[in-house]
Amino acid sequence: MRLVIVSIGRLKQGPERELAERYRERFDGIGGKLGFRGIEIHEISESRARNAAARIAEEAGAISAAIPEKSVLVALDERGDNIDSGAFARHLGRWRDESVANTIFVIGGADGLSPDLRRMAKLRIAFGAATWPHQMVRVMLLEQVYRAATILAGHPYHRA
């Protein structure tokens, strides 16, 4: 199963990018042995539209264009569910075992995701009640994907 992160906004050079790459590389080291084909990241520029509704719609169109058929969509959304790392790992493991071709994680822009994208998502998750910058959400998501792989592999990284 291929994992893809589609994110509004770009990670510039700096500590967030370095940390994101570290978790991505760690995942690549263990994920292949578990039936995952790595993590791709598609960065989409933030909309320059004048109002929030237009920005959300424009960004939703760009996100939708990046989602291949036969994909499971996971929305990172402040209104999503707070799930623990074990539950997250079980979702990824189940989709892999069901031969899902792609799991697509979407991270919206400053105005959030469109209601249509949220409805399309098989899973909507939040990293707590706080609002996080997209750069931090990407780092946290990559860490959780790596953690999920270690859980599925029985690796001691995750201690619960």
Image (tube, helix red, strand yellow):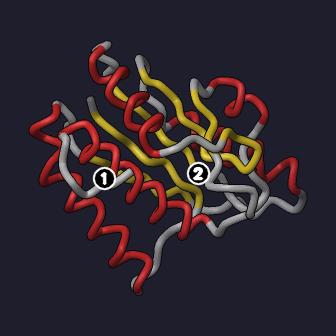
Where residue 1 appears, as percent x and y from the top left, is 26, 29
Precedes in sequence: disc 1 or disc 2: 2
Residue found farthest to the front = 160
Q: Are marks 1 and 2 in contact (CB under 8 Å)?
A: no
Residue 4: image tag: none
Q: Amino acid at mark 1?
A: Tyr
Given this view, does label 1 or label 2 mark the residue nearer the observer?
1
| SS state under label 1 | helix
Residue density around tag 2, few if under 14, some if 14–19, many if 20 or more, within 10 Å: many
Q: Amino acid at mark 2?
A: Ile
Quarter residue 21 falls in: bottom left
Q: Which residue is mark 2?
A: 107
* Front residue (pair 53, 19): 19
Residue positioned 59% across, 57% down in the render: 8
| SS state under label 2 | strand
* Front residue (pair 76, 49): 76
Q: Which residue is mark 1?
A: 146
53 left or right of 37 in image: right
* Front residue (pair 153, 16): 153
Residue 132 vs 99, above or below: the answer is below
